[in-house]
Image (spheres, rainbow, N blue to C red):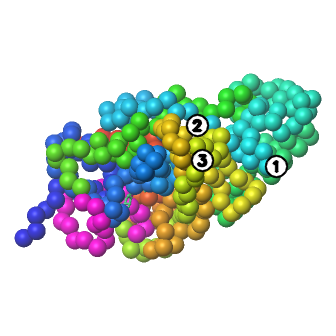
Amino acid sequence: MKKKIKNLVVGSGLSGAIIAERIASILGEEVLVIDRRNHLGGNCFDYFDNNKICIHKYGPHIFHTEIEQVWQYLNNFTKFNNFEFKPQVIIDGKPCTLPFNLNTLHQVFEKSKADFLEKKLVQKYGKNGKISILELKNEGDKDLKELSEFVYKKVFEGYTVKQWGLKPEKIDHSVTARVPVMISCDDRYFQDKYQGIPENGYTKMIENILNHPKIEIRLNVDFHQSDFEYEKLFFTGAIDEFFGYKFGKLPYRSLHFDIEEKNTEYFQNAAMVNYPCDFDFTRITEHKYFLGTKSPKTVVSYEYPQEFELGKNERYYPISNPENQALYEKYLQEAKKLKNVYFLGRLGDYKYYNMDLTVERALNLFKGVK
Ligand code: FAD
Ligand code: UDP
């Protein structure tokens, strides 16, 4: 007879690692973690190349949070460096500050116009205020409306069409609101109290989380092609796939990366440079910036958004809209009928979680299960 596994965790990304660690450490129970990829870490996976540069294989990952319990938890497994993310965006061929802020205003307009607009923005939204591009577009003031059209065209429209295949008005507003227009001179992409990169990389951090005598990890194992018997299942894969797509497929956006080594010390002036209006890629990431690696060479990745196609590429972004949410709700109702089966993570919950919300979700789910 087959041995029944006490706790089976599907997926060794952040969600899977954390739920496994909590069960092993707090409940003292055995956990088997499986992943169908040949590495652990999910989309946070990174690796060190020949130049000792840490490459974020699935796109640039910068940790940032305001959530105390998340920060405390992760600090048990890694130290974070003090990296602050200050990306750039190409506007009319010139690298400018992103998010669009008061410094960007002065980079793109001559002084008297920039001063004039700055005054209006501060009057309307207050110093250090912020406003999403779609809200700014509804502005009644003629000059601010004109500014919003400029920022919309130069920063958001082309990028969003490449990223989502849709214009900003056609996607959930929360998506473009992730990168608001900032009425400040703070050039950081994130304003959170805590931010940084794990000083030995994300993979090492996740290895540390999983490093427990009660946790076993098996890679290259697909849940859907196995027949484990388990008491409890924690599933961080796609919820629609779990149910055999019985109500239809939940749409995702995917990405393709061209990773290139360049024979030069630095390729660009920032860890990430966005190209809203030119080329088919959305952004170029230069990886050596994250850990401040010194090397005569550098490595960059060009990021090309594409539709998610089953069997062809990976799921990266759930696409939030009322129709997809309604489809997800159907799966959620099915999930609720199951005993001792729990869904979590970007794919299990079909939510555009940043890493901190992924961690919080796993920690809170564990508290509920316990
Ligand atoms: P995943 O990382 O997707 O892990 C799920 C795992 O389950 C995968 O390893 C998969 O192989 C495995 N799996 C799925 N189905 C099966 C199956 N049937 N059998 C076995 N294994 C299975 N967050 C930030 O906070 N800051 C950032 O800068 C940031 N940048 C990002 C950039 C990009 C391009 C993307 C896509 C995401 C970014 N994120 C960022 C979000 C971050 O990647 C997620 O929050 C996090 O990876 C979610 O972890 P997860 O474990 O839920 O999912
Ligand atoms: N966005 C944009 N131009 C930019 C940066 C972002 O239009 O230069 C929009 C785009 O719709 C994108 C969203 O803002 O999908 C969120 O950007 P973020 O950088 O948070 O995306 P992620 O890192 O999650 O891919």
> Range of the magenta residues?
218-241
Q: Quadrant of residue 231?
A: bottom left
Q: Is residue 337 visible?
A: no
Q: Type of residue at label 3?
A: Thr
Of pointers 1 and 2, the one earlier in the residue sequence: 2
Q: Nearer the viewer, residue 246 or 4?
A: 4
Are there few (<14), some (14-19), or many (20+) residues within 10 Å of tag 3?
few
| Residue at the spot of label 1 | 92
Nearer to me, 213 or 88: 88
Is residue 223 highlighted in magenta? yes
Q: Classify 307 as above or below 370.
A: below
Residue 92 shown in magenta: no
Amino acid type at image mark 2: Phe
Which residue is at a point 58% across and 68% down the rendered structure image? Answer: 307
Q: Residue furthest left?
A: 1
Q: CA distance from mark 1 to mark 3?
A: 25 Å
| Residue 257 in sight from this viewpoint | yes
Which residue carries the number 2 mark? 85
* Amino acid type for the residue under numbered disc 1: Asp
Q: CA distance from mark 1 to mark 2?
A: 22 Å
